Amino acid sequence: MEKLFQRWYDLISIDSVSGHEVGAADYVAEVLRSMGLEPHYSYFPEDTDRQRPSVWTVLDSGKPGKTMLLIGHIDTVDVNLKNWKTNPFMPTEIDGKVYGRGSMDMKGGDAAILSTVEYFAQHKDEFSGKILVCFVADEEGLSKGTYQLVDEDVVHADYAIMAECRYNNVAVGFRGRFSFEITVKGKAGHASRYPEVGENALISAGRLAAAIEALPTLSHPKLHHGTWCVRYLAGGNSGALVVPDSCYMFVDRYVVPGEDEAMCIRQMQEAAEKLGLADKVDIHLKPRNSPYMKSFAVPEDHELVVKLQESFKEVTGEDLPIDYDPSVCDSNILAVSCGIPVVTFGPSGGNMHGDNEYGYPYQVKNCYEIYKQTIKKLLSA
Ligand SMILES: [Zn+2]
């Protein structure tokens, strides 16, 4: 088996369900070492047991030039063993599909990155500048691996290819996402005296929830528009004859470029004022350890996009359409926090995050070729 596929198979065979990425991290580190590169380990502070490293390295051509970042995550989602027809940690090829956890998302992309960097390590005369390679943990969680590399000042590049599973098009823009918590206050009283006595916080929250979902959003020609989703409401007490005096609300907000958290809070505050609830609500961003992801879009005529499309055409004979994604991924961090133009493109498959996940060998192979060609064009020697 050629090394590219062997690495894909090896990575699938290593259980790196989010939470214990260390086996996959050690594996990529060892492969990088075998190419004469020095792997660096990065741990985020919550990982006190040191089971969740990310691994990164730099291949320097020795000539001045730009830097290309190749990035993939090494963690996978968990498995529900009883629903799998094959052993998810034993890659199994059936009818041109390779089954196994991570076969699609995204150990094929990781293998393609490894073989790309190996090629250029052996052909330093074929590029100038540097290739930064990052294999990150916790992408399926809160992206702590990528955020940690940003904190450690590792992530500097002129271009980035996020090798996530997306083969039939290249994503150049993603929406962002914020979560908000709202507490709506009412006034307690004996239920038998309601509504003369007491003020029902659940009713106020319900009215506010409906008003929030009707709030306008900005729009973007390709990412369409932002969205509001009231995802959770809680309050009251079914066991006591008391008018509910408090209601908790959780609001999800997908955003497009130009929308930020302050703007969203202002909008919700205004909605509360219109309902006469201004002094009865507390609205804030839900605290979390990692920053929230803002929206971005790389121009479609950016050279990174154009060269990737050209390379796709050369390798496959077909056109690679541009796409936009309504969700968020680690590409948001690279584009927004680091200001790096990023394209999201890599070998794909089926049943992502589900049972019997599979990937396509020809796509792993083609992506390796496409990454190589793209780098040759952008970091020409
Ligand atoms: Zn993924």
Image: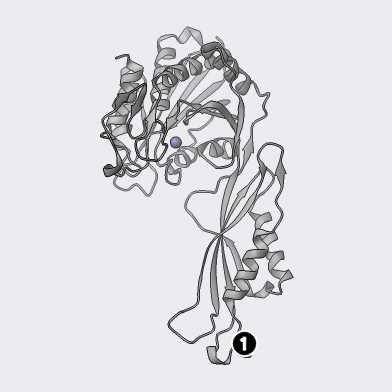
Placement of the C terminus among the 4 image quadrants = top right
Name the amino acid type tagged 1: Pro
Q: Nearer the viewer, residue 308 or 81?
A: 81
Q: Quadrant of residue 109?
A: top left
Q: Quadrant of residue 58?
A: top left
Residue depicted at x 71% and y 48%? 218
Residue depicted at x 40% and y 40%? 353
**Is 376 drawn above or below residue 209 in the view shown?**
above
Extreme residue toward the front, this view:
95
Placement of the N terminus among the 4 image quadrants = top left
Residue 244 placement (x, y as % from top left): 53, 80
> How packed is label 1: few (under 14 Cα within 10 Å), some, or many (20 or more)?
few
**Is 215 drawn above or below residue 145 in the view shown?**
below
In the image, is 234 to the left or to the right of 38? right
In the image, is 360 to the left or to the right of 69? left
Q: Nearer the viewer, residue 84 or 208?
A: 84
Extreme residue toward the top, this view:
125
- Where does ligand 1 appear, by image quarter? top left
Question: Does the numbered disc 1 mark a residue whose Cβ is under 8 Å from ligand 1?
Answer: no
Label 1: which residue?
Answer: 195
Q: Quadrant of residue 106?
A: top left
Q: Nearer the viewer, residue 80 or 179?
A: 80
Examine the rendering and report whether any part of residue 38 can be seen: no
Residue 278 placement (x, y as % from top left): 69, 72
Residue depicted at x 48% and y 13%? 62
Residue 311 placement (x, y as % from top left): 56, 15
In the image, is 313 to the left or to the right of 363? right
Q: Secondary structure at mark 1?
A: loop
Q: Nearer the viewer, residue 209 or 174?
A: 209
Residue 303 placement (x, y as % from top left): 64, 20
